[in-house]
Amino acid sequence: MQRFFFIPCLLLASLFLNSCTTVIDAKLDTGPIELSVDALLTDQPGSQTIRLTQTAAYFDSSTPPAATSATVTVSDDAGKTYSFSDPDNDGYYVWQPTGKDTLGHIGRTYQLTIAYQGETYRASSKMNRVPAIDSLIFVKRKLNPLSKNEGYRAEFYARDIAGAADYYRVRFFRNGELQNKPANIITSQDGGFRTSSGVTDGLAFIVPIRRSINPDSLFALNDNVKVELHSLTLEGFDFWQQLRTQITNGGLFAPPPTNVPTNIINTNAAGRKATGFFVTSAVRSFSASVTQVNIRVRED
């Protein structure tokens, strides 16, 4: 009896679900156009670039329109002001050094000022310290335990600076190309995870952070790998963490999307808002190739 009753119930449920399928054509209102700021300034030699664009509609996948004719300056707490210009009128505002001095210096606080379409926007950020990267090694591994494909797993070594909470972002390049997938947004506090606050202060970076610099396909022989370690403020650290959460947000139980925070503030509280973030980072890097001298035999 129960077996014969079970089959009609399944058929009935299937018909019910099919009859309830409704196509919803969502029409999202287009919000106000806002200024979007992509500003990463470092202590590295050479030019520095700030990109300004305008926000677009939610489903617009085209390149965002450039925000041109803005006045962009950066000043520091040592009394220096750096002017950025947009020579190609494409929204890329560039500062060119006139001598050997760099724009960024560890310990200084920088203020970004943007005058655009009658609005004035400001943001500030301190350039914090960052440790050196000691070495970079490679270990031969299979892509996964059941795979026949083999490659090389990279691992870098660095030691957190003791005495205070330090925040970092890790970037890596394969043959000169930045690995820029959402999963490649790597952040660390004191060389560990945010949840290990204080425990890893002054110690070597933990294994998951050291091995986070690997692409999906692993590295191949003779690949050149470059690792960069960027210092962050606490606000910059939270920005990168929340950005990764939002752009990887998905699945049946994904939380509702939310706006990623910004430190770009309109001096007129009633004026148009801005998006993006102003980041200042001291950067230390290390490069190595997947050659025999850098390959190690490891069981872990």
Image (cartoon, grey):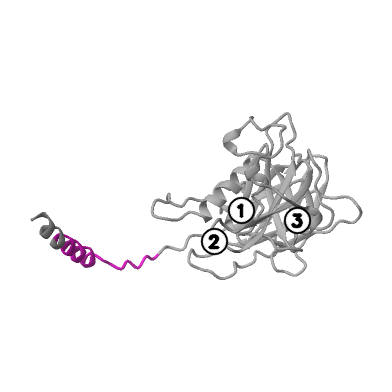
Q: CA distance from mark 3 to mark 2?
A: 38 Å
Residue that carries the numbered disc 2 in the rendered image: 33
In the image, taking residue 28 as reference, residue 116 lies left or right, namely right
Residue 122 position, x and y percent, is: 67, 48
233 or 171: which is nearer to us? 171
Labelled pair 3, 1 in contact (Cβ < 8 Å): no
Residue that carries the numbered disc 3 in the rendered image: 226
Stretch of the chain drawn in magenta: 9-27
Which quadrant would residue 158 be assigned to in this image? top right
Residue 21 position, x and y percent, is: 26, 66
| Precedes in sequence: disc 3 or disc 1 | 3
Can residue 181 be seen in this snapshot?
yes
Residue 60 position, x and y percent, is: 51, 68
Pair 2/1: label in front: 1
Residue that carries the numbered disc 1 in the rendered image: 276
- Residue in the picture at 84% in, 53% down: 45
169 or 199: which is nearer to us? 199
Q: Is residue 235 above or below residue 164?
A: below
For badge 3, the amino acid type reads: Lys
